[in-house]
Amino acid sequence: MRQLTAHEVRDLLATAAGDDAPQLLDVREPWEVAVAAIDPGRATALHIPMQEIPARQSEIDPERTVVCVCHHGMRSLHVAHYLARQGYDDVVNLHGGIDAWSQQVDPGVPRY
């Protein structure tokens, strides 16, 4: 499990293509995703609220890099650790969450 900054996640998403593209896993609540979301670019985006992860884990591709995202990076950190314990080999947590993304990468993403 790795923690990456907003700039590092931006670069990871920008360089990915095809089957190697990461899966951006947003673990926030639906109302939060409605307020602000990261454009995954060539990666795929998947929204599964944190409490639903165990029941919906089969939707998360273990063969791809999984980038976990939440508001400030704590819920996603818990999910990243959980996925790593479940055998996912390449799990990333966006340090600082979507709030850091908004401040450092894309100010067009609303802060809340």
Image (cartoon, rainbow, N blue to C red):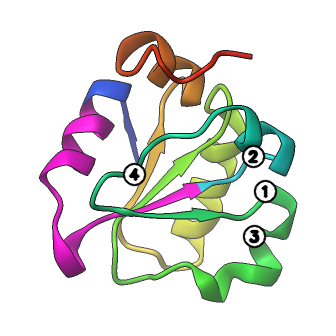
Q: Do tag 4 and tag 3 residues touch (Cβ < 8 Å)?
A: no
Query: Disc 2 and disc 3: Cα gap in Å?
Result: 11 Å
What type is the residue that disc 2 sits on? Arg
N-term mark: 4 or 3: 4
Indicate left or right for 14 with 82 as reference.
left
Instruction: Please name the predominant secondary structure of the magenta segment in the image.
Output: helix
The residue pinned by badge 2 equals 28
Q: Which residue is mark 1?
A: 50
Residue 40's mark?
4
Q: Label 4 sits on what residue type?
A: Pro
Residue 72 left/right relative to 112: left
Residue stretch rendered in magenta on the structure: 8-25
**CA–CA distance in space, label 1 to label 3:** 5 Å
Q: Are marks 1 and 2 in contact (CB under 8 Å)?
A: yes
Residue at left offset 12%, top offset 52%: 15
> Would you place residue 59 above or below residue 105 in this image?
below
Viewer-side label of 4, 1: 4
Say which amino acid is labelled 3.
Ile
31 lies above or below 1: above
Give the quarter of the figure containing the C terminus: top right
Residue 63: x and y in percent read 35, 83
